[in-house]
Each structure stands twice: as structure tokens, then as C-alpha cells.
Amino acid sequence: MKFYKRQFLKDNLHLFFLSTLFLSACANIVSPTGGPKDIAPPKLLIETPKNKTLNFKDKKIEIEFDELIQLKNQFKEISVSPEMDPAPDVVAKKNIIQIKLLDTLVENTTYSINFGNSISDVTESNPVKNYRYVFSTGNYIDSLKISGTVNYVIDTSKLKNVIIALYPTDKETLYKQKPILYTSITTGGKFELNNIKNGSYNIYAIADDNGNKRFDEEEYLGFLDKPVDLQKDSTTLNFTISPQIPRKTRVRENKYYEGKILVKLNYPDDSVKYNVLFPEDFKNKIRLEKATSDSVSIWLPSTKFDSTRIELTKQGKPFDTILVRNFNQDPKMAPIKITDNLTSELLKPGDTYNLIFSRPLKDLDKTKIELLEDSVKKTNFTVSLKPNAIREYIVTYSWDTTKTYEINIKENQLADVFGKTNSSYKRKFIPDSTANYGTVSANFSIAPGKQYIAQVLTSSNEVVRELLISENKVYYFTIVNPDRYKLRYIEDVNKNGKWDIGQVEKGIQPEPVFYYKDEIAVRAGWEIEININLN
């Protein structure tokens, strides 16, 4: 009897297994199909307390949406004006944003919590754009607003992280405190700041790179010529941001390595002088070389020293010193590396052929340089130090576009100021023909007494040609590579031949910059003619 029960159970289990397997095989498992992709942002349902509440006294705010939500990039996107310290605690729980106010609220003040694009649904990340929660601790909500645009005409990448900031009309507050109110600009450089109290303000556009919601002297700034008196409903403002001339020139950093001190300033200042205080045998023997726009390389005459101090002066007045302690008086320097200024195997028409050494030389013996023209040795060339350089030499020769050239320097032929010798160098090149390049002829019409700097730019804003424009005539940009270019012209207000940035302390705006309306297509062997009226 027990046997039959066991057999019955076994047979039925076997049948159940086969049935299950059969059903599984017949069923195709597919993902549920739905309608079109959800592109709608979450919808606002309830705000507690209500948005734009007067005589606000609560410590907690809840904002409810019709679906599950999340917060993204809170630090960047969410702002509170006026700023609260400590900042509110903002969290997303299911479909509700909870805000806990931790700071004591100021009486008779309108507050605005701006969420930017931080709120989105959890499934498709559709953002609730520019949601704002506003309340007042007084009997009314401030209703004035400003709007406008911010532009940086030299490089639009500098428009990241820009805020529009309102300050009292005391100029010193720009450096000493955070703004009364602020807002961020959109990707297109536009801005709108609402709920402003009537009154007079200094208003700035600040490229807030470190996110501290205040102006630091090394950040880009845009400012207006005078304070703005807000009394009417809306005011439109436009800003151009630029680097700022700091109130004081100072050393940001300095580094010593193998006989060279690299000094970085907080501003490109060519008027700075460098004087050795000690050791005595270094005085009047250092060599200066501009490394970048705001940094200088100081080449010392020797590595055999314990320490050196260098004084920096401006207009005859000391403003900083550099102290270097040397813990390695006999560094194992690599051989002098020799490079050149060519970017390809072609020497561009009108360009010079330059040899560049990794360290300054004691002197350069021309006989150590071998010049071959179609494999034939030539000696009727000259070598001279490039003006304002200490490591770059110009090789001058009557280059022939039908010939191939080679320049050789054997190793250990030249010595630097520290007694170290060179590694070998070899370069083959061909002088290129002008037929492979194009010309842009620009007929300028300008007002009497004006001067402009005209620049031909690549798509990445690299300047390939530059001319000073000071009269009504045709100017020629020659030997231009075939490509598409932009044309930029800077109004050279002070006629110093360079673009001058702003200085908020003195109310000096950056020099105006303009662009030609169309791209310029340059073709090999062609001359393109354009007319530019700057009257």
C-alpha cells in the first residue's frame, strides 16, 4: 500500500514538472510595451505653506509633485536669496521636496529659493525648469526684477558659473561680503532676477569659478558704469565680463628646479623688476624669460648656492620677495634638448627657422651647426638670438622652395650656463610655396582718430594673423592656410596695440570687441575681398 502511494506521488510530481516545463516553453517572456517616452516634467500639486506667503514664520516647507522625484546638482542649481547661514536642508522624499529652514529669518524681507533644474522625475530625469518658492516675513513681497545678458567676447567658455550679484552702493562690499541677492545665468548667457526691493544697487556679473558666491580678484567680472536705481517694474541690463586688473600685484607661487625659478603673478604685469638681494655673485647675472602671460622664468647663473632672495619691485617700489633654499647644488641634469618652431616638415613662407634649447647657452658656435641643401653642405647662413629671448636662435638663409634642407647638431657640441652639453639634433624640411596659401584683403572704413586690432581666428579662437588698423584703406592678411576663419576687431582705445581688460576699481571697462558677420573661407592661391565699416 505504501508502495502505491509513493508511486502515485512520484507519477504526479513527474506530470506536474512536465506540464510546467511545457507551459514555460510555450510562453515568450517579453518586456511590457508602453506608449511614447515620457518627456513631461513632474507636475506641482501642493505647496505648504503656499508659495508667496506673507508674514512667514514656519521652519519647514513641503512641495508635493504628482510622481517620484529626485534632486540633482543641488550645490550648483539651488540658490537662496538673500543667502541663509546655515543654508536650508533640502531633501527629496518620494514625491515631496522637504525644506528645513535652519537660519533665523530677517524681518520684512522677501526670500526666494531657486531650484534651477535640480528637480526631475526618477524615471526619465525630466527637469522641472526654474521652479522658485518665494515668501516674505513682512506684509508684502518685493516685486521688482532685472533681466538681460552676459557676454565674454574673447572666449565664451568663460560664461560657465556666472552669477548676477546685487550689492549695496559701497564699492568695498564687492571684496568684503557676499551679495544681497544673486541668480545664475542660463547656458545662453541670459538672466532674470526677481523679487528685488526698490533702491540703488551696484550690480555685477561674476564668473564664480569656485562657487563661493562672491568675487575673488582672480575671477572674471562684468560691471556697469554706475549704480542702478530700481524703482520701476523691470530693468534690462547687459554685461561684458573680462579678467580684472587686481588692486595689487603679488606673487601667487614660485618653484625652483635645476637653476630656474618659475614665478607666477596674479596678473600679467610687464613692469615688474626682479633684483637679487643675495648672494652677491648673483647680482646683475640672472636672466629673465617670459614663460606665460602671467609667469616669468628666472635663470640663475649657477646651481652652486645655499639660498637666494630676489626682490620684486614695481615703479621702483618693492612689493614682494622670493626666498629659495637649494638642497641639491649638483643636480643630475639631462642633456640640453634641442627643438625647433616647425609644426610640420614645411617652413611656412615668411616664417623664420628657429632653434630652441631647453636651457640658456653660454654661447652658440655657428660652426657646430651643419646646414645641408639637397645634401650639399652650406656655410653662408647666420645664427642670431631671437629678440627678447634667451633660449631661441634664428637661422637665416636664402631658402629655396625647390630644395630640401637638413640641419644637424652632433651631441656634446654646445654647453649651457651650467656647463652641461647637448643631445643630438636632426631636422629635414622643405620651404613651402606661397601658392599653397590664401590672402584676405579687408577694406576698412574707420572714424578719424580711431585704432583697431584686427585678428584672423581659427574655429578654436587661435590668432593666426594680426594687423593694426589706423586709417581707411585695404589691409592684407597674407600666407593664410586654406580653412574657414573668423575675423575679430578690437577697438584699441589707448592705442597700445593690445586688448586691455577691465578694472572695476577705476571704472575702466574692457576695450570693445567686434566680429565680422560671416565666416571667411580661405582657398589656396585665392584672394578673398571683404568690406568692414566701423564708422
Image: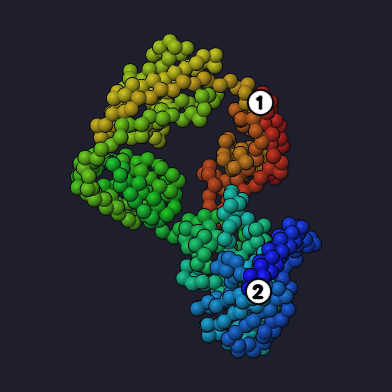
Is mark 2 in CB contact (under 8 Å) with mark 1?
no
Crowd rating for badge 2 (residues with CA inside 10 Å; few <14, some 14–19, many 20+): few
Please identify the quadrant where the N terminus is shown: bottom right
**In the image, which disc is placed on residue 277?**
none
The relative height of residue 403 versus residue 19 in the rendered view (above or below) is above
Q: Is residue 46 left or right of residue 366?
A: right
The residue positioned 44% from the left and 44% from the top of the image is 292
Residue 463, quarter of the rendered image = top right
Q: Position of residue 87 (x, y in %)?
A: 53, 77
Residue that mark 2 sits on: 1
Disc 2, SS: loop
Q: Position of residue 2 (x, y in %)?
A: 63, 73
The relative height of residue 259 versus residue 153 in the rendered view (above or below) is above
> Could you tell me if residue 46 is visible in this image?
yes
Foreground: disc 2 or disc 1? 2
Residue that mark 1 sits on: 524
How many labels were placed on the picture?
Answer: 2
Please identify the quadrant where the C terminus is shown: top right
The relative height of residue 260 versus residue 38 in the rendered view (above or below) is above
